[in-house]
Amino acid sequence: MAKMDMDAIRAKLQSFEPKEKKEKKENTAFWKPTEGDSIVRMLPYNKEPENPFVELQFHYDFGKKGNHLLSPLSFGESDPIAEFSVELRSQGNMSKEEYKETFKLMPSVRTYVPVIVRGEEDKGVRWWAFGKSVYKDILVAMENGYDNIYDPKEGYDIKVTFTPKEKTKTKMFPETAIFVRPKSVPLSSDAKQIKAWLADQPDLFGMFERKTPADLKDELAKYMNPKASSSPVEETVKKAGDAEWGSEESAPPVSPSAKKSESKLKPTENIASEFDSLFG
């Protein structure tokens, strides 16, 4: 009796092994707090020195996981998805649950600020992104005497304490707490270094794809009719006038991504009907 090829057997066995996941490359232009304490120093934003904060709005996981859309509202333009959400609520004729679901069509705000991380100064300026809670805590501190917190010469360092969700009381969400150190210290003792950090900051907007109102009209049409390649609704949306939706001028790439849990929003028959009524 002939023997089986052992090399073939080993190759087959190896095919059953789970494939190693490719590690995602970390974007070094961003800083994320790790478990425990970190010390950071906010800097003036070189494009707008009087305001270190940059607010961007996103539709996270829109229609499918990983589909993060930068809202044109971030640039003072109209957002068809958000406007559709508002229009649905104004027309009524929906259940309480459907009413709540429409709010999932509204974008979420993510705030960015340029920082230097103490102990990692060699990595240069990075962007720290956070949600409403941390943003509020920083603004409260600024209101209570630390209004020059980001001043290069007389500002203050911030202690950031990060707790992963599995170690929090609720075990549902991670927690980030901040504490502004009471003693004023310079950003650096090296004036040339300070000048370089203020000038050389990663281009936040250049890291993300900018979405126009026209782009979001297409995304909304696909969301409401996922199986239709070119439905009457999609065609209607595409023909919506500029006067209603705002400028559709193309622009160079710009804007982010911070991940949230996958949206469970599913269009109901009533919402789909309202969509057709709105654009028809």
Image (cartoon, rainbow, N blue to C red):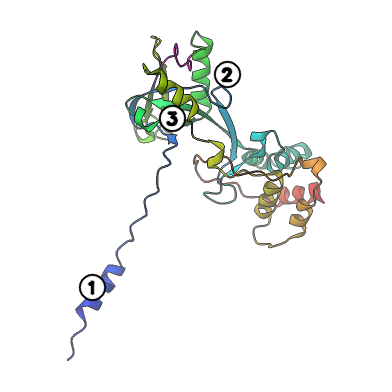
Q: Looking at numbered disc 2 in the image, what kind of residue is underneath it?
A: Glu
Decide whether residue 152 is among the magenta residues. Answer: yes
- Secondary structure under tag 1 reads helix
The answer to whether residue 34 is left or right of residue 204 is: left
Residue 198: x, y in percent? 48, 24
In what quadrant of the picture does the N terminus appear? bottom left
Sooner in the amino-acid sequence: mark 2 or mark 1: 1
The magenta stretch is: 149-159
Q: Quadrant of residue 58?
A: top right
Sooner in the amino-acid sequence: mark 3 or mark 1: 1
Residue 7: x, y in percent? 22, 77
Residue located beneath label 3 in the image: 125
Residue 18: x, y in percent? 32, 61
Q: Nearer the viewer, residue 137 or 204?
A: 204
Residue located beneath label 1 in the image: 10
Q: Residue furthest front?
A: 192
The structure residue drawn at horizontal position 28% and vertical position 73%, both measured from the top left corner, is: 12
C-alpha distance separating marks 2 and 1:
65 Å
Majority secondary structure of magenta residues? loop
Residue 68: x, y in percent? 56, 45
The structure residue drawn at horizontal position 64% and vertical position 44%, both measured from the top left corner, is: 211
Q: Nearer the viewer, mark 2 or mark 1?
A: 2
Q: Residues within 10 Å of mark 3 (few under 14, many from 20)?
A: many
The answer to whether residue 268 is left or right of residue 145 is: right
Q: Looking at numbered disc 1 in the image, what kind of residue is underneath it?
A: Arg
Residue located beneath label 2 in the image: 50
Q: Looking at numbered disc 3 in the image, what kind of residue is underneath it?
A: Val
- Secondary structure under tag 3 reads loop
The structure residue drawn at horizontal position 45% and vertical position 13%, both measured from the top left corner, is: 155
Q: Is residue 269 above or below residue 210?
A: below
C-alpha distance separating marks 2 and 3:
17 Å
